[in-house]
Image (cartoon, helix red, strand yellow):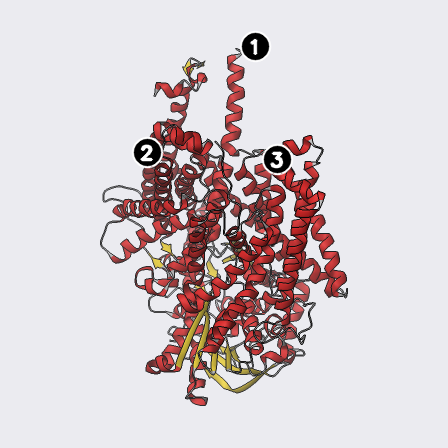
């Protein structure tokens, strides 16, 4: 732990008597407290949006682990989101498994699927990997509505599911409970991700991204790490899909079109590659910008959305996280120089 | 047997569409090392311009040439105004910009020209001698045009100093600058030419699939698959790849798994081939030196 | 009574009355009725965005004419990009944030399915949904949901019955879009043919909207030796099918879904002479069919378009559809007689008698009752003669299960 901090000299610096690290922790705690108060102060519809944002954030974190940290390009993560969503929907529809148990099941299935997909994908790089993953997203709706799977997937009609009730005795509404349920998973998965990425594994992933040959020479088993990353990444996105299914209470092939995968990619780029906090900004972007565009123009809402996307990239080519990092660096330089 | 022949020929016709888009992708890849996701939408928009001019009463070939000029200027303009500021940005930010462009152009096509499908004229007479029940005269003409464009692209990169300079600019911008290549303009030129080839592809495709804002949306994916399958670093490989994708898709649908899984199986086969031959069937294998 | 107490009484009265109104008729005030709608303004189904635009224009017209029962219509139409997850979100925005009285003509089968249960649980009318699926007429399980147009399945039943009667030994091929729209046609044919389906239907083929052409499918179907073709395809692929069938020299009896009977968007792009003999059935008038050039009903629609949608594409049947379905809604609002509570809106929606729409074929009337949630069940067969659709036979009432 302490070794990691050496790469950040500013961590030891004092600001208003507290180290930057402490400040970060205080900030994080404040955000969590705010997140817990949130469902009691906003309307039910706004809560739906907030829940959707944290669900997207989990999906984006999954993609970011793969693309941001490990440098593997995926245009097909909507497919894993779909697999996760369908796993939960089918389990709820066909078996008596309680809803909370379907989430880890969805995660496990996506972990395995992602790992298996990652094996052949090992040989593909850059544009080729983009094509392979894009193909996955392209083919997914077709598989979901394939007639031989109808008995499970409900075919083109999809599956309607019921939202979970809050545990007996808890005096909150169902949608508030679902929010906390999603929040719990989000916190868990972010802690897991943080643990994974800050240590040996994280450094190996980044090394493979930045210099695969050097990484291999240093004794990192690139193939194993890469397919492992694919699995973990798919697991995150799959769990997000499972939560998303509970939220929408409905899955159908049309819910998981190509645009979903593209939206995820946009989300991590806008939020910032290789940034855990950035995914929240990305999630906010992909959730709210289309709504705003729709309110401003009925004729060409997508033109507006695309325009905003390009403008965002222009202002902050490394995403929101990059922007924040830049400001942070300046702040540090300013504090290092001492108050004038 | 006759049905098989028919499937192959109609696959070739579809393949011709993919091949022409693949050519535009190769053009932009050779000159900028980017894959432009908005290529298909640019082609569709150019085709709408042609449609508008023909509707205003201009003869086909006049409209055709004016559209090529328009598409070239549009390509150069997009490069200079929108893409240029991103040359130092991370690769994925550039991809995001391409996605943004795709959405903007697609949405504008719909807003300006509506979403109802529009017939687009073919320059080849329907009763020409080369037409048949298996392959209409337009489909034969389109394949011919694609091959002509292929020859031009090949010759351009192979034999002209400008083509060489463009390849150099993409391969090694710093050294190219040192020997006096104006790298910035080379990139813009690459975009312009890709836009132009895309416009040809659009005007050849529209008579077959009809003109609508989503005309090139999925065609681009198959074109991309074709380009990668053949090898995106050489034009004839990409064209061949496009034809292979077209035929493969038809045969998979007709004889292998039925139409319901046609797309899936075709894509699995393509990705499978790429896993075995990562540089594409006819691509140059790049040996990395440590 | 002093001034102060009278104010207090008034306030108390208001306090009593105001929540009463809000509870009885959400989304309705003394001056306004809020109506919600989800539409595909973006995404692959954006062509249907025209319906939402046409409806917005329609309610603008009604408001200019003074509204309904002294109230202006506030038509709130939002984009869901044809994505069910987004529909859930947008519908809840309309209901919970905007507080609409009910939903009208939301687009799409998967999208409406996603909010089917939610709206019925909350007792919010989901009226005249813009989809041809059969399930919107289920008044027993979903008493707050109602369709509008004849279902695809009913239409397919009509073709199958016609085949059984006119061509009992037909060898049938079916070409359909691989989604709920296409599969409803297969289901309709199965309903009628029953055991004979396996024998009479010699080949099925599907296409995806992402396929560039359907040539391969048509070739496959021809090779099966079929002499009858049923095509359930959207305009782009319907036009391709008619052209390809003709070009390869195949001459089956060709039945075409009424989704794709537009003269300007299907028959002319396919080639007017190539479609001769194609049979379809319809309940409405096609905007581009010369048969309705001087029709008073269609002229009424044209006048509306000219004034409220200047510059719009007059060949787009989505605008005709929007006008017809909006008129049905208007009739329901008028019948409400000032009581716009959700119960009454639903009650009146199920109480339409012989409404004649200017955009509907002669003889086709809108009828609903508490046990009939299929407002339009009548259709007439028609055949393409190279210039126009020629109606033949009687106006047929579909089963509308």
Q: Is residue C130 depicted above or below B27 in this figure?
A: below
Task: Judge if badges 1 and 2 mark residues of a common chain.
Answer: yes
**Nearer-N-terminus badge (1/2):** 2
Q: Where is mark 2, residue-wise?
A: A192
Residue B113 in view (yes/no): no
**Distance Cα–Cα, label 1 vs label 3:** 46 Å
Q: Which chain does the residue under circle 1 lie in?
A: A
**Distance Cα–Cα, label 1 vs label 2:** 42 Å
Q: Picture coordinates of residue A84 (x, y %)?
A: 34, 49
State which mark lies toward you, 1 or 3. Answer: 3
In depth, the one of A333 and C35 nearer the eye is: A333
Q: Where is mark 1, residue-wise?
A: A340
**Distance Cα–Cα, label 3 vs label 2:** 42 Å
| Dots 1, 3 in contact, CB < 8 A | no
Q: Picture coordinates of residue C306 (x, y %)?
A: 68, 66
Label drawn at residue C132: none
């Amino acid at each position: 732990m302490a070794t990691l901090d050496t790469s950040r000299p500013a961590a030891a610096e004092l600001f208003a008597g507290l180290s930057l690290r402490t400040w970060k922790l205080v900030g994080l705690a404040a955000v969590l407290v705010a997140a817990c108060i949130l469902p009691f102060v906003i309307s039910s519809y706004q809560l739906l949006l907030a829940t959707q944002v944290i669900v997207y954030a989990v999906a984006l974190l999954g993609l970011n682990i793969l693309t941001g940290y490990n440098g593997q390009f995926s245009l097909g993560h909507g497919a894993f989101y779909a697999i996760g969503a369908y796993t939960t929907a089918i389990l709820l529809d066909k078996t008596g498994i309680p809803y909370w148990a379907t989430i880890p099941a969805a995660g496990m299935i996506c972990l395995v699927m992602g790992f298996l997909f990652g094996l052949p994908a090992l040989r593909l790089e850059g544009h080729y990997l983009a094509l392979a993953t894009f193909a996955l997203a392209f083919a997914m709706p077709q598989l979901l509505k394939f007639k031989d799977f109808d008995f499970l997937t409900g075919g083109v009609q999809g599956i309607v599911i019921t939202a979970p009730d809050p545990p007996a005795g808890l005096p909150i509404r169902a949608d508030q409970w679902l929010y906390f349920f999603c929040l719990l998973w989000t916190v868990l998965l972010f802690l897991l991700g943080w643990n994974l990425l800050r240590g040996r594994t994280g450094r190996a992933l980044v090394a493979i991204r930045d210099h695969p040959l050097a990484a291999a020479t240093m004794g990192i088993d690139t193939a194993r790490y890469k397919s492992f990353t694919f699995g973990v990444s798919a697991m995150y996105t799959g769990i997000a899909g499972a939560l998303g299914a509970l939220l929408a209470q409905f899955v159908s092939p049309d819910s998981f079109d190509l645009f979903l995968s593209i939206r995820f990619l946009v989300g991590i780029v806008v939020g910032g590659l290789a940034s855990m906090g950035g995914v929240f900004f990305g999630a906010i972007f992909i959730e709210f910008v289309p709504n705003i565009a729709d309110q401003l123009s009925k004729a060409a809402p997508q033109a507006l959305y695309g325009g905003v996307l390009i403008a965002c990239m222009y202002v902050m080519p490394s995403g929101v996280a990059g922007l924040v990092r830049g400001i942070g660096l300046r702040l540090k330089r300013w504090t290092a120089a001492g108050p004038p | 047997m006759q049905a098989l022949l028919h499937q192959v020929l109609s696959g070739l016709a579809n393949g011709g569409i993919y091949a022409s888009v693949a050519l535009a992708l190769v053009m932009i890849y050779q000159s900028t090392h980017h894959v432009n996701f908005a290529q298909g939408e640019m082609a569709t928009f150019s085709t709408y311009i042609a449609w508008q001019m023909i509707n205003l009463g201009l003869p086909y070939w006049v409209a055709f040439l004016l559209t090529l000029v328009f598409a070239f200027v549009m390509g150069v303009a997009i490069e200079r105004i929108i893409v240029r500021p991103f040359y130092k940005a991370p690769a994925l930010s550039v991809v995001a910009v391409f996605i943004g462009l795709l959405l903007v152009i697609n949405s504008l096509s719909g807003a300006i020209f509506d979403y109802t499908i529009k017939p687009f004229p073919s320059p080849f007479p329907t009763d020409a001698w080369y037409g048949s029940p298996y392959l209409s005269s337009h489909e034969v003409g389109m394949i011919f045009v694609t091959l002509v464009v292929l020859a031009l692209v090949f010759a351009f990169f192979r034999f002209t100093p400008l083509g060489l300079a463009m390849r150099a600019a993409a391969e090694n911008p710093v050294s190219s600058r040192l020997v006096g290549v104006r790298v910035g303009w080379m990139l813009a030129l690459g975009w312009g030419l890709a836009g132009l080839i895309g416009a040809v592809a659009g005007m050849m495709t529209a008579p077959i699939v009809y003109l609508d804002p989503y005309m090139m949306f999925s065609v681009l994916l198959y074109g991309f698959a074709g380009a990668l399958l053949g090898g995106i670093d050489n034009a004839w490989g990409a064209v061949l790849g496009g034809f292979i994708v077209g035929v493969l898709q038809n045969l998979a649908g007709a004889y292998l798994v039925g139409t319901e899984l046609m797309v899936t199986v075709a894509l699995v086969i393509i990705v499978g081939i790429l896993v075995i031959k990562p540089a594409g069937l006819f691509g140059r294998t790049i040996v990395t030196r440590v | 009574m002093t001034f102060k107490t009278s104010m207090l009484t008034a306030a108390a009265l208001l306090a009593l009355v105001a929540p009463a109104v809000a509870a009885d008729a959400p989304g309705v005030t003394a001056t306004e009725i809020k109506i919600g709608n989800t539409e595909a303004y973006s995404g692959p189904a954006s062509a249907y965005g025209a319906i939402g635009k046409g409806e917005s224009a329609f309610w603008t017209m009604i408001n200019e004419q003074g509204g309904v029962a002294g109230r202006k219509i506030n038509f709130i139409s939002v984009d869901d990009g044809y994505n069910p997850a987004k529909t859930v979100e947008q519908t809840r925005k309309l209901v919970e944030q905007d507080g609409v009285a009910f939903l009208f003509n939301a687009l799409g089968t998967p999208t409406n399915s996603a909010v089917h249960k939610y709206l019925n649980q909350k007792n919010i009318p989901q009226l005249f949904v813009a989809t041809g699926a059969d399930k919107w007429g289920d008044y027993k399980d979903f008493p707050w949901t109602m369709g509008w147009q004849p279902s695809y399945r009913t239409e397919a039943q009509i073709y199958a019955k016609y085949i059984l009667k006119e061509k009992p030994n037909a060898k049938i091929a079916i070409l359909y879009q691989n989604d709920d729209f296409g599969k409803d046609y297969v289901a309709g044919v199965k309903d009628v043919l029953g055991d004979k389906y396996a024998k009479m239907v010699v080949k099925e083929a599907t296409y995806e909207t992402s396929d560039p052409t359907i040539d391969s499918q048509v070739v496959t179907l021809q090779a099966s030796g079929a002499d009858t073709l049923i095509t359930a395809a959207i305009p782009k692929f319907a036009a391709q099918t008619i052209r390809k069938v003709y070009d390869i020299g195949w001459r089956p009896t060709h039945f075409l879904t009424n989704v794709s009977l537009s003269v300007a968007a299907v028959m002319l792009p396919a080639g007017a002479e190539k479609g001769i003999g194609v049979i379809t059935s319809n309940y409405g008038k096609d905007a581009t069919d010369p048969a309705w050039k001087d029709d008073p009903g269609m002229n009424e629609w044209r006048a509306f378009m000219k004034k409220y949608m200047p510059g719009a594409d007059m060949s787009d049947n989505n605008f005709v559809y929007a006008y017809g379905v909006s008129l049905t809604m208007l009739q329901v609002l008028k019948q409400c007689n000032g009581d716009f509570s959700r119960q009454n809106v639903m009650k009146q929606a199920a109480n339409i008698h012989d409404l004649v729409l200017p955009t509907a074929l002669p003889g086709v009337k809108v009828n609903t009752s508490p046990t009939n949630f299929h407002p339009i069940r009548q259709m007439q067969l028609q055949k393409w003669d190279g210039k126009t659709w020629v109606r033949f036979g009687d106006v047929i009432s579909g089963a509308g299960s």
